[in-house]
């Protein structure tokens, strides 16, 4: 049965919320391997923990949310994050879960799990809701300052993942930009537009953030991690602001309050559609093992759901199937990728070493 | 009385919605100078137009929404957009309004109105709502691929504009990023962080898109036009999706529908807070004349409000006052700007001509 290595020291609410979430997942029958400082773990465990599928890896360091990722991972070999990653890579555990420093998770994944052959940069994707469906947004973290070939590879990864997750034969790929026209967008976006036009994936052109809630426009949204982060967090922020306005209006009038209370079922359904905690985590694509990243602000419920997600990913061998698909796709797209590499070699100024 | 030059051929709903909006503004007593194709104008005018402060500049070209801006402006000297810009610059009119190709408006502004001395790139700012107040977001259009010195100048422009518009002595400047830490963000964002730390403006650090709805965090949000566009449009898109979910739920149940109908006043108030058409336009900062850009999808009401906004801007001599403030601020920040310019000269590879 797949065991999930959990970095219990990572996250705004660590270690308590992480341990509580992991214990809840264990109560659902998912074996968890808690990696962290012994004192922090023992204090937070429930009295009946011995009856649950819980094991431990004790360590004495942690990587804080505000630490510079590369340095932290290289320096803190005995941190909960690095230890959790290592026990997955050495086969003791089968998947990795962390709500900690996402940059550090990315660095540790590349360093210890390793990139899929040919992939320049692993990326994080997540399904975001439309009016009555969803699309897969890649990248939502980590990869700022992307080159066209990186964005192009995100498109390939999105294509392969949506084929697998939604059984869509030719997912429609759209590029996030500030206008539909091919000349709109940053330099990298414009060049990616050209690459995608020449590629065999079903490229449907640029799309603006305003249209993303509409149905039937796209299956995969390609963007760099900076724009993806702005998009994801502004969706969450706007929803939260709107609900706060509704709450304020209710607080000012008993009439509004009564009507909203009577209609609470509808609002709960709507809130649930935007609830990140319902999935609890996103899969890192482009590495060799199942790495699940969660929101820094995850509470126990989000952690529980994130660990259950990691369990399903591993049980369905989703990473293995995805990587096979991706490798085949990279082979099909080899000519384009080689062209880009050649052009880059020719045009980029040599930096003196 | 200030007269507004209106590009009636620009916008998704041009020329009808633009003419209708301009006529409505004229009915409020605002003189408008309609620039466009004669046939398009005469067909759409009401029978009593001669009693209104409406005048004309006829031309025979238009710049379409999907034309490449620089080329279009240089080639189409007799387009409504260029003509409207020119009649403002030559003093026939006092301000410019267009819902057309925003890239072309930017290019024409730089070409004909000219940049404020020392400003590299004019930028568009707009107030976005928080829980119970607002912040000024700059840039929301045009300037993709910004260098640190551009973002730094956006901060100075935001500072000066908010001082003027909200009478805040030291507006809090925040930088849009994917995390709070100074090492988060694109290369340009990280370098801008350093510049702002050294500057005399009240820099409060990086901010994530999720926090922007909270009160009392910031007065000015600095970002490049790509991220600003994603932010602005995802706020609009998310609100629209949420309202469509509410409507769908109502359509499925007479009980929900009745409750929502009884509570319609509250929802209308909330919708109004996000209604771009209520302002109708945004001021281009960093050029020598009042240039107002409107949403491409503006309807007659948005156009009317945009022209009334242009009128107020001109009547209050806002551009003149803003430019005076900005020049003084640039003088105070001269040492930082000179440092940046020097570093750039030293570090950037020379491109062979």
Image (tube, coloured by chain):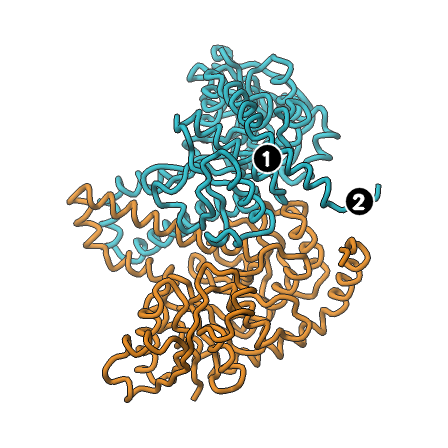
Chain colours: A orange, B cyan
Which quadrant of the view contains residue A266?
bottom left
At label 2, counting other C-alpha atoms closer than 10 Å, the crowd grade (few under 14, some 14-19, many 20 or more) is few
Which quadrant of the view contains residue A64?
bottom left
Determine which residue is flagged by label 2: B351
Question: Residue B219: x, y in percent?
Answer: 42, 36
Query: Residue most toward the right?
Result: B353
Frontmost residue, B79 versus A100: A100
Question: Residue A109: x, y in percent?
Answer: 55, 72
- Looking at the image, tell me whether mark 2 or mark 1 is earlier in sequence order: 1
B240 versus A306 height, above or below: above
Residue at the image point whose x is 29% and y is 48% from the top: A244
Image check: B264 left or right of B57?
left
Point out which mark residue B289 bears.
none
Between marks 2 and 1 in the image, the one whose residue lies nearer the viewer? 1
A202 versus B351 height, above or below: below
Which quadrant of the view contains residue B72?
top right
Quadrant including the C terminus of chain A: bottom right
Frontmost residue, B299 versus B353: B353
């Amino acid at each position: 049965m797949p065991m999930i290595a959990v970095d219990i020291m990572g996250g705004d609410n660590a270690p308590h919320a992480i341990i509580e979430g992991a214990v809840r997942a264990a109560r659902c029958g998912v074996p968890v391997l808690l990696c962290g400082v012994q004192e922090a773990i023992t204090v937070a465990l429930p009295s009946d923990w011995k009856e649950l599928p819980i094991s431990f890896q004790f360590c004495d360091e942690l990587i804080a949310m505000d630490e510079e990722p590369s340095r932290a991972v290289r320096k803190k070999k005995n941190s909960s994050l690095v230890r959790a990653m290592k026990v997955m890579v050495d086969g003791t555990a089968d998947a990795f879960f962390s709500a900690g420093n996402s940059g550090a998770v990315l660095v540790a994944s590349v360093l210890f799990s390793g990139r899929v052959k040919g992939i320049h940069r692993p990326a994080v994707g997540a399904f975001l809701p439309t009016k009555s469906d969803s699309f897969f947004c890649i990248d939502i973290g980590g990869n700022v300052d992307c080159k066209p070939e990186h964005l192009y590879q995100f498109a390939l990864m999105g294509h392969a993942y949506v084929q697998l997750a939604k059984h869509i034969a030719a997912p429609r790929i759209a590029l996030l930009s500030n206008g539909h026209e091919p000349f709109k967008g940053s330099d990298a976006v414009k060049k990616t537009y050209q690459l995608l036009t020449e590629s065999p994936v079903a490229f449907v052109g640029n799309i603006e953030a305003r249209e993303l809630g509409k149905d039937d426009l796209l299956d995969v949204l390609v963007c760099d991690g900076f724009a993806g982060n702005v998009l994801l967090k502004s969706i969450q922020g706007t929803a939260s602001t709107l609900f706060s306005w509704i709450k304020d209006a209710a607080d000012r009038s008993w009439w509004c309050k009564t009507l909203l209370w009577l209609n609470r079922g509808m609002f709960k359904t709507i809130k649930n559609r935007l609830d990140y905690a319902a999935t609890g985590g996103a899969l890192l694509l482009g590495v060799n093992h199942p790495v699940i990243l969660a929101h820094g602000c995850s509470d126990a419920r989000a952690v529980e759901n994130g660990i259950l997600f990691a369990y399903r990913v591993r049980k369905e061998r989703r990473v293995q199937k995805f990587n096979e698909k991706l490798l085949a796709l990279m082979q099909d797209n080899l000519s384009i990728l080689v062209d880009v590499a050649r052009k880059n070699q020719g045009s980029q100024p040599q930096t003196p070493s």
